[in-house]
Structure formats: C-alpha cells, structure tokens
Amino acid sequence: MSGNTSTSMIVTLGFVTALSGFLIVTAYQTTKPAIEENKRLRIQQTVLEVIKGATAYKPFVITANGDLLEATPDLKGTNVYAGYDAQGKLMGLAAEGRAQGYSGSVETIYAYSPACECITGVKVIKQTETPGLGDKVITNKDFVANFEKLDAKLDAAGKALANAIVTVKHGSKKNPWEVDAISGATISSRAIAKGLNGSAQEVLPKVVPLLSTIEGAKP
Amino acid sequence: MSLIKQDDTITVDTFMEGIWRENPVFVMMLGMCPTLAVTTSAINALGMGAATTFVLIASSLLVSLFRNLIPAGVRIATYIVIIATFVTLVDYIMQAYSQALYAAMGAFIQLIVVNCIILGRAEACASRNKPLKSMVNAAGMGLGFTLALLCLGGVREILGNGSLFGLPLFGEHFQPWVIMVLPAGGFLVLAGWLILFEWLKLRKQGRSQQVGGAVHEH
Amino acid sequence: MNTDSVTFIFFNSVLANNFVLAMFLGLCPFLGVSGKLNTAVPMGLATTFVMLVSSICAYFLNELLVAFNIEYLRLISYIVVIASSVQLVEMAMKKLSPALFRALGIFLPLITTNCAVLGVALFQTSREYDFVQSVAFAGGAGTGFILALVLMAGLRERLALAKVPSVTQGAALSLMIGALLSMAFMGFAGLGAE
C-alpha cells in the first residue's frame, strides 16, 4: 500500500470519484430512453384501461397559473390525460387523485366522461393498505361498482362540483355522488373518495370549459 | 474472516462458504433490513438478491483491482464511493427493465449501499485477494444472500398470499395468513428459519455424541 | 389531519410508520446493541443526532443537485455527506464534550452503515418535504428508533433471566420479540386518518 500522505489520499479519492462519475453518467444516459419509455407505457396502459373505449391518449398539463397546455417533459403541473377512440372522438378524461389512507397515501387514476358529467372508472395505482382489508378497495366488486357512474356535475358558476364526492357508511348510499364504503375498510374507502373529490374539484372547473380544444386535439 | 487465507488458490470453499457456512443472513445476520423488508413475495426476493449480487461482484472486482493503490486512511470512503456507484447503476438498470419490480422494491434498491454484507466483503476479502478470487467469493456470498431471501420470500408468499412467484397454489377458499406479508411476519419467518437450523445443528451434535458414546462403551 | 403538517409527519414516523418496526430500517443496531438499556439509549441518541445533521445537509444538497440538474448523483453524494457528518459529529463531540464522546464514541462509526440514516435522507427527498418537514421527519425517525431500541432492550434484559428452549436462544428470540413489538405497533396504523 502507498503511504498515508494527504496527496496520495486526495489523488486516490479524486480518481475514484472521477471514475464513478463517469460510470454513473454513462449508465444514466444509456438507460434514460428506456426508463422514459417504460414510464410512458405504464401511464398509457393505465389511462387506456380506465377510459372506456379509448384506443389512444394525449397528455395535457394544467400549469400553476391555470393554463391547459399539451404536455412536454419540462412542463410541471397537474396531469390530465384525454382518451380518444379509433375515429379520434373524445371518449373521456383521466386525472390523478391522492389522499391519506390507513397506512400511507392512496394514489388513483380516474376517468371522467364529459357526456354524462360523471366519473366512469377508478384504478388504484399505488397503495400500502393492510393486505386482506384495505386492499379490498381494488378487489371488492360492489365497491368498484360505485365508480361506474359517479356524479361529478359542476355547479352553476362552474367553479366547483355541484355536490362534493363523499363516502357514506356501507349500505346507506342514496345519491349518485355518494360512495358506498366497504364495511371494515372505511378509512381506505374514504381515501379513494377523498382523492377523487380533491382532484375533481381542482381539475374539472378548469378543463370542462376547454373541452372543445381537447376534442380538437388529435392524439 | 480468518478462514480466507492469503494464497491465491480458488477452492470450492471460496465459493461455497457464502452459501452455507458463512451465509450472510442465517449465520452472520448481516443485511437484515432488505432481508425483511422486501421479502413479501418470492419475485421481490429474487430481484433484490440479483441486484445485491451484481453490486457485490462488481464492487469486489474494482476494490480488488485497486487494492494496492488505495491508502489505508481513505479506504472506507473509497469503498463506499465504489459501492454507491454500482448501486446507482443497478437503480437505473432496474428502472429501465421493469417499473413494476422497481416500484415493489421502493427505496430499498438505493439502500443496498449501506448493506453491511458488501462493505464487509470489500474490507475482508476483496482488499486482500486477487480479482478473480474476490469475485468468486462475492458470487458465493451473493448467491447465499439470494437463497436466504428466497427462503423467506417463498414462505411469506405461500402463507400470506397463497401463491408462489405469483402463481396461486391453493383453491379459491384459501384464507391467507395476512400477518405473514406484514412486517411482523418478516420477523417471525426469519426466527422460524433460525430455529430450524439451530435444531438441525443440535440434532447433528446429539447424534455424533451418541455415536461417540457408543464406541466408547465398546 | 393534514398529512403535510409537521405534527403529523413527526408522530407518523415515530408510531404508525416506525422506522424499525414498520419500515425495517436500522435493524442491525436494533438486533445488535439492544442487549442492555445503558448501551441502547446512547446509541439511539447518537443516531438521532446524526439523522438530524444529515437530514439538514441532505436537504440543502438536494437543492443544489436540482439547481444543477444532476439528480443522478444524489445517492453517491448523500452517502458521502452522511459519512462526513458522522466524522464531524465525532470530532465536534471530542472537542466539546469529552465525557459524552467517551460514552458514545464506539457507536459513532457504526452509524454510517445504519440504513435508517440514509433512509431519512432518501425518503424526505422522494416525498418532497420542505425544510421544516424534513427536520420533523428526521426527529420523528430518530425518536421512533430510540423508542424501539429502548423497548427491545427492556424486554431482552427481562428475558435474560427467563428459561427458554435451547433452540430459540439468541437471534431467534430477539426476532420473535421484534415480531411482537411490530404487531403492537400495527395498532398505531390509521393514526391521523379521518
């Protein structure tokens, strides 16, 4: 081993860091396209699955000052995806919801149909709820049926939902904007509805007035 | 680590010690955090094992190549930089390969950096041996670690989810033993394996004592 | 309760998402130095201190990495920062409080390879916490670590006198206590959910 002089230490550390920097940058550059493609495929799959009848989609971004723009990699803001069928007809919109569940945040992608002014489907993309209890929000057929036609009309002013999406106790759903919770997994059920409500209240008032622009945009 | 001699001969033992006699999980109790955290299913266990093995082999090679150039004072710092480099590589490769697997591992891929098995190998083996021998030893350790993870992941997935590698094993009416895929189950299953190995060891000792005793009586 | 509030982050990382018992971080010291209360407490304190220091450093370092658009160097720079802050803490303690240094000295180098410390830095980045939230998170993680370590040490001190089957002695027994503690902490899940 060479001596313990400061110079040799600095030279060694410098050399090793330079080498590792080179390796990391090479790996980053090589894998970047594949990683971005993977992420895009994952979003595409989820969006096309959740918007019924859609065969193609186009991502949009609502920026901090409220503009709706076509997504580019550098644009930061709330993501909205528009789904079109083979003829290029707008089938629905998809957006992301997120709320605190029982043991962590529950993230969802939901579809909104302008035709019925309602939510037509929800897909959980990330959750850490208790297996066997909280994760029933994905598997329970009755619960999933809540989101086949969940009312999400805007109020007269178009600034918020006419009726906020709320969770009600199992078996007491009366109105089309209510979500019937799973008994034994109320908190997880509520997290999904809260995520939907939060996102719909923010996204829909901005997007609905611009529907014609989105319809015109081709995927 | 007195068992690693200063000679360059590569024996079967160089490779095998990591798998059985010095198994990093069951014998040395190293790298506990990923061992318990990601072994909720067999496939996650396999992914984690493969990632760790890659980092082990690659960092052993590099440390061993530079072993005579690294001053003792900055030894550990250099090892950590080398290990962190390869972990970053694995992190990107895994993201490029499968987003689903990457999401299941969470931050634990990046936490491979502080897995004591790797730093331990760099210090105890790679810094004293030629590249090939270090790599063979690291491969054995990595394989031993992967096997141990599979032992845990397999049991936890079978009991907690009724499946293995995602394939359902039992009929529809199987009621999963949910606690097994929760954190507490990780502790319990590892304790179970340790008890099993201890019992086997005691039984073997008991037998050889009995045989010895019998010979003595004659 | 608002999940971004400082109180929520603190108590969540102490109880519901306890670093050791729910997230499996920092298990090596949890199993290794939890044999006696009088070593568990100093170890926990030293770890918490390093967590706070490295969390603050990691926060500013991340700002820097983002500013220069070199996020791919995050992991390597975090680990170097942690290793150096352990070293700094060691030197500062030696200078300022030799008594404390004598009590904690032997534990300090071990903290570098404690994944709970790197975990704090990585999680606060991936959850996009701001400065105050990061400090609350690090404090919570440290407090949770001390809590788990002290509980474990207390139980093990008691069990040292108990007669257990010979096959379960040692690590297996510690792991089973860990399992029971982890189950107990599962009761805290749902904390903060409405």
Image: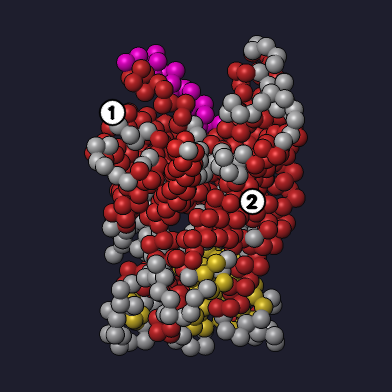
Q: Residue at x 59, y 37 (%)?
A: B118
Q: Residue at x 44, y 18 (%)?
A: C91
Residue B3 in the image, given as x and y percentages of width and height? 61, 29
Q: Give the residue type at disc 1.
A: Asn
Residue B143 in the image, given as x and y percentages of width and height? 63, 47
Q: Residue A95 versus residue A16: which sits nearer the camera?
A: A16
Q: Main secondary structure of the magenta part?
A: helix
State whether residue B31 appears in this view: no
Q: Is residue B65 left or right of residue B29?
A: right
Label placed on residue B50: 2
* Image colouring: secondary structure
Question: Quick one: label 1, few (<14), some, or many (20+) residues within 10 Å?
Answer: few
Read off the chain for label 1: C
State whether residue C180 appears in this view: yes
Label placed on residue C38: 1
* Magenta span contains residue C90: yes
Magenta residues? Answer: C80-99
Q: Secondary structure at mark 1?
A: helix
Q: Residue B155 versus residue A170: which sits nearer the camera?
A: B155
Q: Residue at x 65, y 54 (%)?
A: B94
